[in-house]
Amino acid sequence: MSVNYFLTGTVFTNDPDSGKVAISNSDVKLLAENDLVLDEAFADQDGRFRFRVYPDETYQLRGEKENFFSTRKIFSTIGKSVNKDSLTAFNTTVEFDTEILLEKIIIDKPIVLSDIYYDLDKATIRSDAERVLDSLVMIMNDNPNIYIELSSHTDSRADDDYNMDLSIRRAKAAAVYIVIKGISRERVFFKGYGESKLLIKDAKSEEEHQINRRTEFKVLRYDSEKKSNEQDDYVRFFENSKEGLN
């Protein structure tokens, strides 16, 4: 008796108007836990792909497509093996199914980094925030052609100058963290916005204030060969600014 295991899946993106949309011809890699590429496939016109997998293994799937963020997803067959004693056919095929979501790269679109919190009046990266920033490091590694701005925002419960200074220090701390993790400093910019971009202008509850106290990143440039004059000015400002990563 033999059992053959296969992992099939769909690569898709979320369209604001039509919901889930399959992405054809996207590159999907099946990786071992050490990032060794075990297999590779290109999704068909319906966004579908298929890999042979084996019992009691953990894999990573990485989906890639030009103009989309490369995305990783963990898949495991541990605990999903078929008991061969229960089989009646000589050959049995087991199919697993999954989905890979690819988000389109949109220049200057803020993306909130959830669960990055700071202690009161401090800009030190807490251990519970490191996990989130480590995910951003992986995104930067998997998308080597993106240049980002890390930004920090405060609530409105202190004066403007204080909040601006605090937000700059917090944004810089996040930027320094990912540079220390190996991301080129040339790809990382940071800026503090203080309370100038409140999401909830008349926040009352602590939950509403927390929504305003957020850390975000946005793509400033995608593909180092193409950059606008405005982005050139941003680079010059960054290099000459006291906000540089010194």
Image: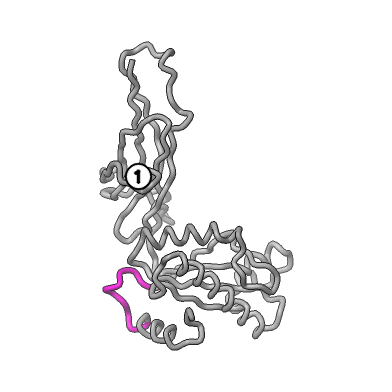
Q: Quadrant of residue 203?
A: bottom right
x, y (%) of residue 164? 61, 81
Identify the residue at image location x=29%, y=59%. Answer: 66
Q: Is residue 192 visible?
A: yes
Q: Is residue 131 above or below residue 61?
A: below
The answer to if 131 sits in the magenta stretch is no
Identify the residue at image location x=40%, y=44%. Answer: 33
Residue topped by disc 1: 31
Q: Is residue 219 above or below residue 95?
A: below
Q: Nearer the viewer, residue 55 or 22?
A: 55
Q: Is residue 96 left or right of residue 243?
A: left
Q: Nearer the viewer, residue 188 or 96?
A: 188
x, y (%) of residue 36? 33, 46
Q: Which residues are magenta?
A: 221-230
Q: How is the image coloured?
A: one colour
Identify the residue at image location x=48%, y=79%. Answer: 245
Q: Is residue 25 above or below residue 79?
A: below
Identify the residue at image location x=31%, y=13%. Answer: 90
Question: Outermost residue, right direction?
Answer: 205
Question: Outermost residue, bottom direction?
Answer: 240
The answer to if 229 sits in the magenta stretch is yes
Question: Outermost residue, top direction?
Answer: 88
Q: Is residue 118 left or right of residue 26?
A: right
Q: Is residue 110 visible?
A: no
Looking at the rendered image, the quarter that the N terminus falls into is: top left
Q: Of helix, strand and loop, which mostly describes the magenta segment?
A: loop
x, y (%) of residue 233? 38, 85
